Image (cartoon, helix red, strand yellow):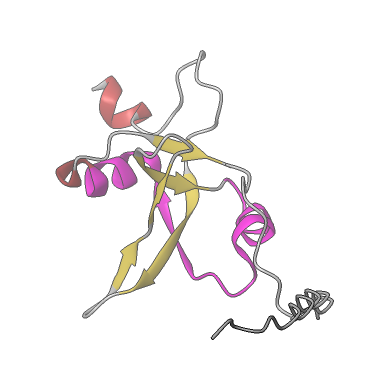
Amino acid sequence: MADALYGDDPEPGEPFPAGRLCVPVRPGTRASVTRLFRTPVGGRTAVAFTAPARLRAVLGADQPWIPLSEAALRALTEPLGVRELRIDPVLTAPRPATTSVALPEPEPEPLPLPRPLTALAS
């Protein structure tokens, strides 16, 4: 009975509130698919954000997302072997530059000095 009343309420020791999370998705063949990411050591993880502004700050304004509860996100990713969930992660690598920057041309290496000609003895 308590589960039915408090299924999405966080435990007192949980650092993040339960409820709606903003989960980044990518287009699939029939519907949107939850995006999975890699941890710094290479493990697969699901990612969610507590507010749309946090998602946009990390992944950009054009990143599509859907609202899901933590329980629903875990249920979607568990069959894929993903057991880790990162809430409100920060970007660990710089975003690629959108404009190209001209790099200075490298200095050409000096040509080798010509060797003196020597006469062959005949």
Residue 33: quadrant of the picture: bottom left
Q: Residue 97 at x, y = what percent?
A: 71, 71
Q: Residue 93 at x, y = what percent?
A: 62, 50
Q: Is residue 55 magenta?
A: yes
Q: Residue 73 at x, y = what percent?
A: 33, 46
Q: Is residue 40 above or below residue 11?
A: below
What residue lies at 47% left-to-right and 38% top-to-bottom? 86
- The image quadrant where one finds the N terminus is top left
What residue lies at 75% left-to-right and 75% top-to-bottom? 112
Query: Which is nearer the eye, 76 or 115?
Result: 115
The residue range painted magenta reads 50-77
Left or right, 76 with reference to 13 = left
- The image quadrant where one finds the C terminus is bottom right
Q: Residue furthest top?
A: 13
Q: Is residue 91 magenta?
A: no
Q: Is residue 62 above or below residue 86?
A: below
Number of numbered discs on residues: 0
